[in-house]
Image (spheres, grey):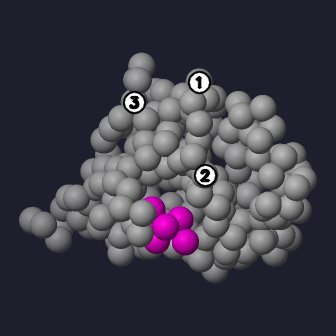
Amino acid sequence: MSARGGTLSSPALSVTLRRELAFVSPDLRRLDGVESEVLALPFFSDLRPLRGAAGLVDWRMCGFLSKLLIRGRIDGSPGELTLLPSGERLSVDKLLLVGLGPSDGFTPKRFDDALRHILETATRARMRSCVIELPGRATGAIPAADAMERFLKIVRSFDELDELILVEGQMAQRAMDPVLERERRRTRARVG
């Protein structure tokens, strides 16, 4: 895992034989310690200021993401994807802004669609490492364990990504641990 100063928790969890998965807390100091090709920032069209990692990155970039919203360059509509260079203020190379649409009625299907868009974009851009705040997790629109179940089902189709780091707090990580443990057992059973 690419981290400075040991900022990743649960480092090097091998979810499959070909991919490493780790967590980083939603905190600027922790995010600063992660080096990756892209940071995926899902956000709702109707929630301002930006929440979660998107809000932290906006603050770090002196309101740059908010300025894009105000100018109408992005609006958070479902399926909207914007890939930007991160500049020198962040340790990731690029930012992937992912529109989720309105926060009311956020559904598992919208979670799946947004996550697939993130992974497809990273794959098409030939990225090998990706930091992702799972869609809807910044506001609790989808429970942590449900998000992890859906994430694991979808990510199986994206073998090109070697390193995935999820932005999640400690409580959410604990809620995701049983789901990850089941996946590890399934993987070992398939291999063994």
Magenta extent: 117-122
Looking at the image, do the residues carrying marks 1 and 2 touch, with CB atoms under 8 Å apart?
Answer: no
Kindly identify the amino acid type of the residue bearing the numbered disc 3: Ala
Between disc 3 and disc 1, whose residue precedes? 3
- Calculate the distance from the C-alpha at mark 1 to the C-alpha at mark 2: 21 Å
Between disc 3 and disc 2, whose residue precedes? 3
- Calculate the distance from the C-alpha at mark 3 to the C-alpha at mark 1: 12 Å
User: Quadrant location of the C terminus?
Assistant: bottom left
Q: Kindly tell me whether residue 69 is visible in this rendering.
A: yes
- Calculate the distance from the C-alpha at mark 3 to the C-alpha at mark 2: 22 Å
Above or below, comparing residue 83 to residue 112 in the picture: above
Q: Which residue is mark 2?
A: 84
Helix, strand or loop for disc 1 = helix
Kindly identify the amino acid type of the residue bearing the numbered disc 2: Leu
Q: Position of residue 107 (x, y in %)?
A: 71, 76
Helix, strand or loop for disc 2 = strand
* Mark sitting on residue 3: 3
